[in-house]
Image (cartoon, grey):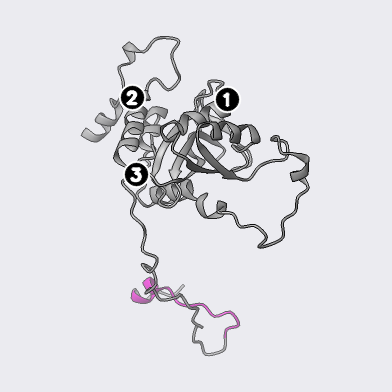
Amino acid sequence: MAAPAVKQSWHFCNNDNIPHNTHRLAKIQPVIDYLQRKFNDIYKPNRQLSLDECIIPWRGRLSINTYNPVKITKYVILVRMLCEAVTGYTCNFHVYAADGKKLEDTVLTIIEPYENIWHQIYQDNYYNSVKMAKILLQNKVRVCGTIRKNRGLPPSLQTLRLSRGQHEFHYNRYMKGVDRADQYLTYYSIFRKAKKWTKRVVISAPTRRAPKLDNPGRLSNFRKHKLVNIVTSGRSVKPQRQCKVCAVQKKKK
């Protein structure tokens, strides 16, 4: 009975000290600041970083909730993440708060600890634009990714067609950092039912230990699954194997 009582009274700041017109993430801001500081101090990533977004499912009434009818999980809390491309280590993250902040300002906030040292940011066409690339280059950050035609792309490049093998990009190699971080989080899922969005965000925060490369030959000794024909007398057109439980208990279907 102690665990539900502790979970019910679990808060991350004193609500009496929160002003009336404050930031929408004020109730979890101390936890966000702590995690961001730890992510930056514990581990220094390599040059290649990937910028993408992950989601926290939430169908409750919430002002920062986003809706995307195309996705399977339509009602989510959006978290933009900056991860190391090779290991998936979470370098920094930003929880969307629906505060009217421009996308360029959000990206600059996420990559701020890694400016002026020529990191390489890999991002998709949602974040990439000519204007964004110029801003990143001014902050000594290189950028690589796909781009939409209406994002300031010159007309000479809009009709450009490259043949297979004509140009080699590292985009497909280094764009999987956030996906790799999500994959590691699913191995040790700590999702719990919660009526408060603050608990769901903190429990689902992109926490991760220092990266360790997975051995490519870890699964090499596993036997491949092969289909085996069911041995029958030939009387049945569609033979079925008997249930193991029913066979032990000597029951017939």
Q: Amino acid at mark 3?
A: Arg
Q: Are marks 1 and 2 in contact (CB under 8 Å)?
A: no
Q: Residue furthest bottom?
A: 233
Q: Which residues are magenta?
A: 236-248
Q: Amino acid at mark 2?
A: Pro
Q: Quadrant of the N terminus?
A: top left
Q: Secondary structure at mark 3?
A: loop
Circle 2: is it few (<14), some (14-19), or many (20+) Cα within 10 Å? few
- Which disc is residue 208 wearing? 3
Q: Residue at x 28, y 25 (%)?
A: 9
Q: Secondary structure at mark 1?
A: loop
The location of residue 102, given as percent across then percent down, is: 57, 25
- Which disc is residue 30 wearing? 2
Q: Specify whether 104 is left or right of 37.
A: right
Q: Amino acid at mark 1?
A: Lys
Q: CA distance from mark 3 to mark 1?
A: 28 Å
User: Where 224 sits versus 17, above or below?
Assistant: below
Q: Quadrant of residue 101?
A: top right
Q: Are marks 2 and 3 in contact (CB under 8 Å)?
A: no
Q: Secondary structure at mark 2?
A: helix
Kindly identify which residue carries mark 1: 102
